[in-house]
Image: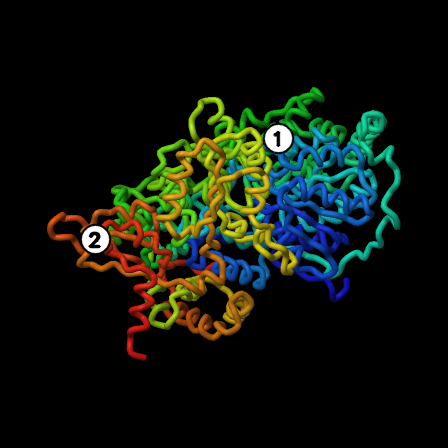
Amino acid sequence: MQTINFLLVGVGGQGVLMASNILASVGMMAGYDVKKSEIHGMSQRGGNVSSHVRWGEAVFSPIIPDAETDFLLAFEAMEALRYLPMLKRASVLLVDRHRIVPVTVTGGSAEYPAYEAIESVLRQVSDNFRWVDGADMAAAMGNSRVANIITLGLLSTYLNVADDVWKDAIARRVPKKFTELNFRAWEAGRALRRESAAVLMPAG
Amino acid sequence: MTDKRRKDLLSGNEAIARGAWAAGVTFASGYPGTPSTEILENFARYPGIYAEWAPNEKVALDAAIGAAYAGRRALATMKHVGVNVAADALFYAAMTGAEAGLVVISADDPQMHSSQNEQDNRNYAKFARIPCLDPADSQEAHDMMPAAFDISEQFDTPVLVRPTTRISHSFTPVEFLDERLEIAPRVKKFPKTPQKYVMVPANARHRHPVIEDRIRALAAYAETSPLNRVEWRDTELGIVTGSVAYQHAREVFPNASILKLGMSYPLPMQMIADFARRVKRLIVLEELDPFFEEHIRLAGIPVEGKSIFPLCGEFTPTVVRNAAVEAGLLSAEQFVAPPETPRAMPDVPVRPPVLCPGCPHRGGFWAIKKLHLPVNGDIGCYTLGVVEPLNAIDTAGCMGAGIGVAHGAGKASGKKHVAVIGDSTFFHTGLPALANVAYNNSPVITVIMDNRVTAMTGDQPNPGSGQNLMGETAPRLELEPLVRALGIKHVKRVDAYDEKTVEDTLKAFKKLDEPSVLITERPCALLPEVRKTYLPLEVKADECDGCGVCLRTGCPALMKSADIHAESGRAKVEIDPTLCTGCDLCAQVCPSDAILFRVQMEESAHALPV
């Protein structure tokens, strides 16, 4: 099989790493070789964060090559724009509308791009762009921290992996008292359903 | 196969910790530093071991050397630049060897994700005549630990293990046995063999030929060690590689033959020569220095490396691929090109690293700027005092450098300088520099920003924290008596959140012709006990005229609102309640008293009907 490449991006504190840990576990439990790479460092809080997750028969580099991202999960709207060279026409882009305004914008030295501009650029790059209201849905569920799990639920509709595997991976990674909430978030995301144009991976 | 065999997804650092535990390590010491920190944090959780944070890497390595002299397998962990600090210890340990295995982890940082340089520490192995192992994923990081200890004991040498950021912080599957080697101490009594362990010149002269013989024996070992292997595929192209570059080689050149070096020093020159003979074109794929390449060239073997691939920065499949296409090794048509920049691409605002909301360092820089003196900074969160809008630091080089630089610059120019250093960095290497300031009577103003932890790497405890790595209560190193004992007369401790006193103290120190030390005290705002006290402040919208003074503190919790002040036409400020901790700095600097102080917030909360 071809390696499947997931690029998860957002802002420090949004649960990018938690989501990528779950996704890596799902891949491993589903029987794939898995690699996951992230960078810690100077951006403890408020910096942009990205995590590469790769599933395959044998995965070598922990870093996704340019133009080989199959799924981009952006937990913050404009963050999706930072990774254009990594995308291709068939990339599925799941982009949360949530905005976290950086200090450069509050300080007045930069401007936050409009939703229309973000969408227009991403649609020029990929045939499978989609806004996700993960942050809003999570807030309505009473805990904005589960936005990342909602997006994972939506992602699961594009992948050939059994529900149990997802739930098992989630249960292993989230604190016990939040397991039920995270299951509900995942199911809410799953209920959003795949857009028919996109392919189910791995095929067959 | 027993039921104890398990498989899990581990980071390189978790795998190193597990491997060290499995190898029977009982003693580990280190100093936090990205990307090495999680090794010791994880190791400390295993049963039957002792682990500690030392004040600096040299102390950590000396301690590990002592444990190995005493016959216990010992580990020292640090980041690449930490080895510079520990180098003196590394070189004598290379001369003496030890009674039990001694492994030094040097976590290198190609790309400088969180470092001041990208030195390639394979050079230390050659320099000190010791072997170096380079893991290429978490499985190897795990498996190389028992191997490293065996080599250390078989050849009586310290062993350097050199993960890089992409190994330490990547997660890959690891199969392991959930059990450890129980190793009896290799000596009953501390060795009394001064000819081996006392490096006076007469003994050292006898040891030098011993270590030269040792490195030759290790080179012979490298020829047959399973750490090095050849993978035969197409022989048109042969690649010598190791570490994470091996993974990129497999990704980008799936058909090439590969000589994979798990032991990056000393090199198996016969193995390399044989490999070179059997491939049509030989290249080296290695991050940073042309370390393999130079050895291979010296042996008279034609090879290309840095003429194709970059010397600076880390490799990615894309970097390797583009360089290979440029050199004619691959054709561009094999790859999908990245998308062209779309029309009307908006600028994407940067998210620069900033001091956290409530960071106790922020107010210190606010006050220091008002002195209009050159400021010599140091390594820690407070290095972020350099960024907009604070712009408060003029130099920062390495751990503990600021005080020394301030002293030298001040003495040479006759000007007054300010040195800024955190508590952990002060314990690390700032202390001897401050002794120099006192001893040579330098009018430097030293500001020690004491937040009680090593914050930059994730709030590890240090000698000032009152707690150690094993989670036990520890004596708290008190800064004021320590500084006074150095002979500095002008010492003041101030609450870091008390902006006026911080400013007044600094202004008074500026007039002095003698050394002075201001200690600003407040725990890191990310500590769990501090998080419990967060209380978001509020702006009194009718008082705020949008002057923007508070925004110049660079606090991420402050932003311009949609509410415009009628007379000035400027946007009023609002406070993000999810970010504000209630440190009061903005309320203190506001010229219009338009921000409610924490006490006012508390009062209004109490005034609410229950």
10 Å crowding of disc 1: few (<14), some (14-19), many (20+): many
Residue drawn at 33 percent across, 63 percent down: B599
- Give above or below for A179 relative to B332: below
Type of residue at label 1? Val
On screen, residue A193 versus residue B148, left or right, reads: left
Measured from the top left, where is residue A14 in percent x and y?
42, 58
Q: How many marks?
A: 2
10 Å crowding of disc 2: few (<14), some (14-19), many (20+): many
- Which chain does the numbered disc 1 sit on? B
* Residue occupied by mark 2: B572
* Residue occupied by mark 1: B284
Most foreground residue, B215 or B263: B215
| Cα distance between the residues tagged 1 and 2 | 59 Å
Type of residue at label 2? Lys
Q: Secondary structure at mark 1?
A: strand
For the C terminus of chain B, the image quarter is bottom left
Most foreground residue, B450 or B248: B450
Sequence-wise, the earlier of marks 1 and 2 is 1
Q: Quadrant of residue B275?
A: top right
Measured from the top left, where is residue B20 in percent x and y?
71, 51
- Give above or below for B432 relative to B498: above
Instruction: Tell me if label 1 and label 2 are in contact, CB under 8 Å.
Output: no
- Give above or below for B28 relative to B297: below
Q: Secondary structure at mark 2?
A: strand
- Give above or below for B258 relative to B522: above
Residue drawn at 46 percent across, 36 percent down: B445
Residue drawn at 71 percent across, 22 percent down: B299
Residue drawn at 33 percent across, 48 percent down: A103
- Which chain does the numbered disc 2 sit on? B
Disc nearest the viewer among 1 and 2: 2
